[in-house]
Structure formats: C-alpha cells, structure tokens
Amino acid sequence: MKVKHMIAIAALLAWGAANGDDGVKWDSLDADQKQVLNPYADGWDQLEPKQQLQLSRGAERWSGMTDAQREDAKQRFGQWRNLTAEQRDTIRTRYVDFRRMSLEDQRRIRETHARFKKLPADRRQQLRDRYRDLSPEQRKRLQDRIKDRRSKATSARD
C-alpha cells in the first residue's frame, strides 16, 4: 500500500475519533445542555457514544425552543410513550420508507397532509372513518386509482 493511502486512512480514522466515536464528554456540554441532561449526569460515562451525541444534540435543540415549542414537544413525546411497541415499530418503518422516497413524493405527501390538517376536525374524522371501514381490496383499488392519477398528471406535465 502506498504511503499516501496509509496517511489518508490514518487521517480518516483520526477524524472519525475526533467527531463522536469517543462520545461527548460531560464537561464539554454547555450549561443549558447540562441542565436539560441533569438526570443523566451520574451515568453519563456509561452511555454509548452514539446515545451521548443524540442526547447532547437533543438538549441543544430543546434549549433553542420557545415555550410553545417545548409544550408541543412534550405533548408529542407523551403520545409516543403511550404507543405500543408495535405501533412505534410501524411508525419507524414508515419514516424510513418516507425518507427513501423521491423528494417530489415527499413534497406531495407533505402538501396532502397540510391540506388534510386544514380541514375541519369533523371532516378529518369522517375521512378517517371512511378509510378505516374500507376492506383491504377497496383500499388497494383506491391506492391504485391514486397512483394512476399521479402517473397521468406526471405524463401531462412532461
């Protein structure tokens, strides 16, 4: 192996070690992060480096939130905690699927969701109930019809 390649590999390994492979030292956290993460203070050194990094980033985000944003986050976290393990796994799977979609499909889904959220609460519930009451075959036909409309709209734009 050439010396240049060995130096490049050593530099990458050193960069990786300097960027989170060793975790986050408690002393490197700022005062706001330490206040948020105080329940973890005694066991901080026993946490996995990845978890330390995630917690420190979360504490940083938390410190930058308004009171309203914090209340919203608390509410969402409470809802998350009340989900079953199966429901959480489903959400995680759907999130991964969403992230794998094209940016155009992600944009379209966000727009559809925004339109749905603007509907009156009774209309949203009515739509949920109608969808829930569909048989698997009816859901499949509906999804196919939607895909056909999308492909026709895409073809018309091209």
Image (cartoon, grey):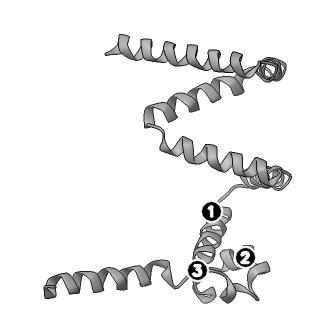
Image vertical order of residue 26 relative to residue 55, above or below: below
Give the SS element for disc 3.
helix
Viewer-side residue, 46 vs 136: 136
Question: Is 36 displayed left or right of 94 in the figure?
Answer: right
> Of marks 3 and 2, which one's residue comes earlier in the chain?
2
Q: Disc 3 marks which residue? A: 49
Tell me, yes or no, if residue 104 can be seen here. yes
**Can you say whether 145 is above or below 121 in the image?**
above
Residue 144 placed where, x, y %? 57, 17
The disc label shown at residue 61, or none = 1
Which amino acid is tagged 1?
A: Arg
Circle 2 crowding by C-alpha within 10 Å: few under 14, some 14–19, many from 20: some
Residue type beneath disc 3: Pro
According to the picture, the residue beneath numbered tag 2 turns out to be: 37
Q: Position of residue 41 (x, y in %)?
A: 74, 85
Residue 90 drawn at (x, y percent): 70, 46
